[in-house]
Image (cartoon, helix red, strand yellow):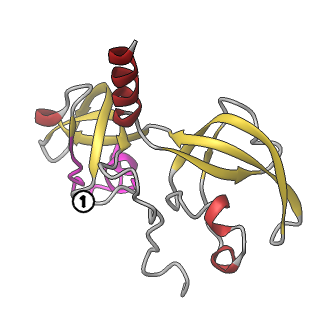
Amino acid sequence: MYCSNIIIRYAALDTDMRKVAMVTPAQARTGATFKVLINPRCLRCRYYKVCVGRLRHGGKYRVIEVRGTAHLCPLIREKMKVVLVEDAPVVAVINAKTAVAGIRTRYEKITCGEMRCKYYRYCAGTLLEKGEKVKIVRVLQGVNCPLGKTLVLAEILPVSDDPSDKQIFKEPSNYLNP
C-alpha cells in the first residue's frame, strides 16, 4: 500500500499541472477545450488569479472537472463557472531528430519565411517560446518542407518542472499597447 501511494504521487507530479480557472457556462463541461484570450482589463479584476491568472495567453486547455461555484464576471457580465483544467496539446512543426513520442525536450521554433507553405502556421504560429520545455505527445506526420529541412508535425505540451510556477501568463510586448 505504501509503495503504491508513492508511485501514484510520483505519476501525478509527472503529468502536466492542473489549474483552477473560470469559464463561461457554455465551456463548463468535462472534455471541452478552449483557447485563452486575456483582455487587458482582466489584469485589474479581483478574480484574475483564479480566472485566467495561471493560464497562458493564447494557450489551449481542456476542462477536466466542473466545480459547483460560479462568480459574476464584471467584464462580460455573465456568471463564470469554476473549473479544473489541464493543458491541451498544441500542433506544431518540430525537427524530426527530436520527434520521439513521450520525450521531454526544449522547443526550437522553426524559422521560415515561406508564408505560402501549407505548414507555415505550424512553424510560425505557435505561442510556444524558444527554449521552453515541452513533452512530445504524438508525432502526426512528416512535413514536405520547401526549404529542405527534415521536419514533422507533432502534438506537443508545454511542461513545467516547478509545480509552484505561478506566473504562466507572459504578456506579449504589443499586448497592452496595440
Query: Can you say whether 93 is above or below 11 in the image?
Result: below
Q: Is residue 111 visible?
A: yes
Q: Which of the pair 33/68 is nearer the observer?
A: 68
Residue span colored magenta: 105-126
Does the magenta segment cover residue 109?
yes
For image coordinates 57% across by 64% down, the residue present is 53
Residue 112 magenta = yes
- Give percent across and percent down for residue 27: 75, 42
x and y, in percent, of residue 103 in the image: 21, 31
* Residue located at (20% from left, 52% from top): 108
Q: Is residue 20 above or below residue 91?
A: below
Residue most extreme to the bottom: 177
Q: Nearer the viewer, residue 109 or 36?
A: 36
Left or right of 153: which side holds 48? right
Residue, x 89% and y 66% (percent of image)? 77
Position of residue 130 relative to residue 43, above or below, is above
Residue found at the far top of this picture:
1
Q: Is residue 123 left or right of residue 97?
A: right
Image quadrant in which the N terminus is located: top left
Q: Residue at x 10, y 34 (%)?
A: 97
* Position in image of residue 125 (x %, y %): 40, 55
User: Does residue 98 appear left or right of residue 115 in this picture?
Assistant: left
Residue beneath disc 1: 130
- Residue 118 shows up from this direction: no
Relative placement, left or right, of 126 versus 25 is left
Give, as a three-letter code, the residue at label 1. Lys
Q: Name the quarter where the C terminus is drawn.
A: bottom right
Question: 81 or 33, which is in the foreground?
Answer: 81
Residue 71, quarter of the rendered image: bottom right
Q: Residue 76: image x %, image y %?
A: 83, 66
Indicate the secondary structure of the residue bearing disc 1: loop
Main secondary structure type of the part rendered in magenta:
loop
